[in-house]
Amino acid sequence: MISIASIVEGDGEVAALPVLLRRLAAELEPFVLVNALPPIRVRRDRFLNKDEELRRQLLLAASKCGDDGWILIVLDADDDCPSLLGAEICRRAREYVPHRRLSVVLANREFEAWFIAAAQSLDGFRSFALTSGERVEAEAPRNAKGWIRERMRGKPYSEVIDQPAFAARIDLQQALDNSRSFRKLYKEWRTHVIRES
């Protein structure tokens, strides 16, 4: 079993990311046991721009996951290039936790882009509805939350309530097929979790 200490920026991701991590194990690699610890929530700007905050949160994650654990940072890329910013965050983070496995995954552009990538599997669930024949490039909408919100018929989109529900429902293969940043999450998950089995 591997313990995963994740760092996220939103309340919705605090509940949703462990669901996704457990589903990756249960559906794609059922022989792997993971302990997806409750994520550490940070303020993105403060976490990225204040070295002491970055250090403090990384050391907390390191203590939570233990010597054989994995630290997973999942943030929204917003308007940044996910691969460039992710590599820079990873380089800086390794200075503080060189003794731990570490990954940085930036959802391009927002965490909700992973739901857009698997939107067909959400159609009709929790008031989410696609227009007939609607197709969209998952990582293209600048405001992925707004894109989801516009398709919630009859009720508002709530990150805290809907993100974990959508994470439990999405078709993981659709997300992998349609989202480069979700494939990055899966690649990192396989690198750090599968090697334990």
Image (spheres, rainbow, N blue to C red):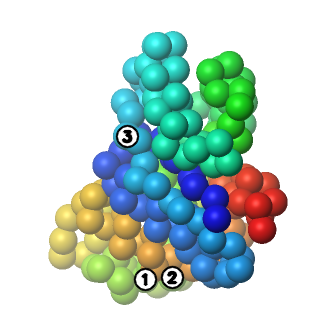
- Tell me the CA gap for discs 3 and 1: 29 Å
Residue 98: give x, y in percent of width and height: 71, 27
Q: Which residue is mark 1?
A: 123
- State the SS at label 1: loop
Q: Which residue is mark 3?
A: 41
Q: Nearer the viewer, mark 3 or mark 2?
A: 3
Do the residues bearing badges 3 and 2 touch, measured as CB atoms within 8 Å?
Answer: no
Residue at the (36%, 45%) spot, across then down: 10
- Residue placed most toward the observer, 132 or 138: 138
Quarter the C terminus occupies: bottom right
Residue 132: give x, y in percent of width and height: 46, 84
Which numbered tag is attached to residue 121? 2
Do the residues bearing badges 2 and 1 touch, measured as CB atoms within 8 Å?
Answer: yes
Q: Nearer the viewer, mark 3 or mark 1?
A: 3
Amino acid residing under circle 2 = Ser
Residue at the (68%, 19%) spot, across then down: 95
Amino acid residing under circle 1 = Asp
Crowding at label 3, few (<14), some or many (≥20) Cα neighbours within 10 Å?
Answer: some
Residue 136: give x, y in percent of width and height: 57, 65
